[in-house]
Image (cartoon, rainbow, N blue to C red):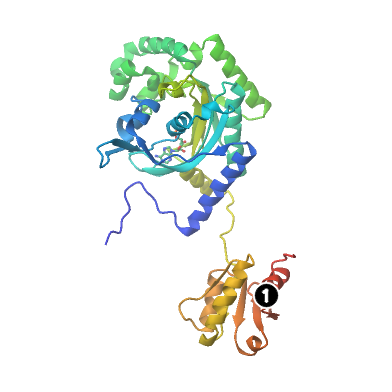
């Protein structure tokens, strides 16, 4: 018997699935309000998309991808993130030929081969939004505001919003020079990874999690020190929009996404109390991405929020979740001869829009009543005896304990009127 799931994956059982649905539905609602349209891309893509679209000096591409050869000997990869696939779909389906900007959202599983721990999984789920085709800093602000609005509606508190500008490729080549100069005297004190990064991608030293590197980077020049006037202006507008909306933020010059097609805004939302994996979402502008995939120069900006960490934080903070769905009605047969009738009544109630269920294990009436209580049905329709001969049934209100006789004809209407307070 196979009894263990792969490491870093999870089963979402019915009690938890309601929490997931609540988070996803709240996100969909926000997307409707902000006018983002849903896009669904494949769960796997050509490996090259992520090598080019995420960047081959990132941890994701260097060591975390689920890459394999399919039976046709093509290299494919389970998507580790959603932005590159969305940019690919935008180009491939010529969404750039329609009205711009194109505002899209997605939900779904992502895959990264990382060491699993609380809040870090190998299959995890993201809610994402992307805007392609506009360079307006107000769009960056809209996305950030939308993410914060979403967290707020879920009842999350004490969130830290960090924002930064990583400038444009020109600002960054200056920063690279300055970083190499800054770290040269302390080169040997950096971790092995960072020594390599200093050549390939020195910006990544700024966000190294190793304590020693973190300390050494404390006084290093940051992206903010190297912004050109255009980038400065863009960042100024993003900040002004956020201020105008009353959204508090901290400027964090060490928040980097060290790839050439990431431009301008970078942001991350942190919760203080969920341990090492404190980021519950992040994003930024990527004006060079579509071009890196072979398309025309196209500005873009987006974010991805982690569902597991959001739910974890909601649970830790005691945020409210809706009650579990419970059927309205349980249809019980008083004796085996009433089973067929019960089956018919069950479907008639469902056809009228009530959620209803019955026993399928041949239980006694007493055991059926107990079951109805356990699954939390509001009413039990008891079919049998004299009532049935009169074309009626006994209906018990499980909350109040009272029982009335109702005619089978028009039963759902009567139940709605009597118990659920719904009137036609
Ligand atoms: P990223 O795509 O790395 O910017 O991540 C965006 C968000 O996805 C993060 O803020 C996390 O909330 C979530 N996330 C990223 N990696 C994982 C993972 N391995 N397990 C669970 N959540 C993750």
Residue 111, x across and y down, in percent = 37, 40
Decide: few, some or many residues near mark 1? Use Cα within 10 Å; few <14, some 14-19, many ≥20: some
Image quadrant of ligand 1 equals: top left
Q: Residue furthest right?
A: 423
Q: Is residue 267 visible?
A: no
Residue toward you, 302 or 76? 76
Residue 264, x across and y down, in percent = 51, 20
Residue toward you, 339 or 326? 339
**Residue shown at the point (40%, 54%) measured from the top left:** 11
Q: Is residue 423 above or below residue 203?
A: below
Q: Is residue 382 above or below residue 213?
A: below
Dot 1 corresponds to which residue? 411
Residue toward you, 24 or 287? 287
Classify the position of the C terminus by image quarter: bottom right
Residue 120, x across and y down, in percent = 40, 41
**Figure quadrant of residue 290:** top left
**Residue shown at the point (75%, 65%) measured from the top left:** 423
**Residue shown at the point (57%, 81%) measured from the top left:** 341
**Residue shown at the point (30%, 24%) measured from the top left:** 193
């Amino acid at each position: 018997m196979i009894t263990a799931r792969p490491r870093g994956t999870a089963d979402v059982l019915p009690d938890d699935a309601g929490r997931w649905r609540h988070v996803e539905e709240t996100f969909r609602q926000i997307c409707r309000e902000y006018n983002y349209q849903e896009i669904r891309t494949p769960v796997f893509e050509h490996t090259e998309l992520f090598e080019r679209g995420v960047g081959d000096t990132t941890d994701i591409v260097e060591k975390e991808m689920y890459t394999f050869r399919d039976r046709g000997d093509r290299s494919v990869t389970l998507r580790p993130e959603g932005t590159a696939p969305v940019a690919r779909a935008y180009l491939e389906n010529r969404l750039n030929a329609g009205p711009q900007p194109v505002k899209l959202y997605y939900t779904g599983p992502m895959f990264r081969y990382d060491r699993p721990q609380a809040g870090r999984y190998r299959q995890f789920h993201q809610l994402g939004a992307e805007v392609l085709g506009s360079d307006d800093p107000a769009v960056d602000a809209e996305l950030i505001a939308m993410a914060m609005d979403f967290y707020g509606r879920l009842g999350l508190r004490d969130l830290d919003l960090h924002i930064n500008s990583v400038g444009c490729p020109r600002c960054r080549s200056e920063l690279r020079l300055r970083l190499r100069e800054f770290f040269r005297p302390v080169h040997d004190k950096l971790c092995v990874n960072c020594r390599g990064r200093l050549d390939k991608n020195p910006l990544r030293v700024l966000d190294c999690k190793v304590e020693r590197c973190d300390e050494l980077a404390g006084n290093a020049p940051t992206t903010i020190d190297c912004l050109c006037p255009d980038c400065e202006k863009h960042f100024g507008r993003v900040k002004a929009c956020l201020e105008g909306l009353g959204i508090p933020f901290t400027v964090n010059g060490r928040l980097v996404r060290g790839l050439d097609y990431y431009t301008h805004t970078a942001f991350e939302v942190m919760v203080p109390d969920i341990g090492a994996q404190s980021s519950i979402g992040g994003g930024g502008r990527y004006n060079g991405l579509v071009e890196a995939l072979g398309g025309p120069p196209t500005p873009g900006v987006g974010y991805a929020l982690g569902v597991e960490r959001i739910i974890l934080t909601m649970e830790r903070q005691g945020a409210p979740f809706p009650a579990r769905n419970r059927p309205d009605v349980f249809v019980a047969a008083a004796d085996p001869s009433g089973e067929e009738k019960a089956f018919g009544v069950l479907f008639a109630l469902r056809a009228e829009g009530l959620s209803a269920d019955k026993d399928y294990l041949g239980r006694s009436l007493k055991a059926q009543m107990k079951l109805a209580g356990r699954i939390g049905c509001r009413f039990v329709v008891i079919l049998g005896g004299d009532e049935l001969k009169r074309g009626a049934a006994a209906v018990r209100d499980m909350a109040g304990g009272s029982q009335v006789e109702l005619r089978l004809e028009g039963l759902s209407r009567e139940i709605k009127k009597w118990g659920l307070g719904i009137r036609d």
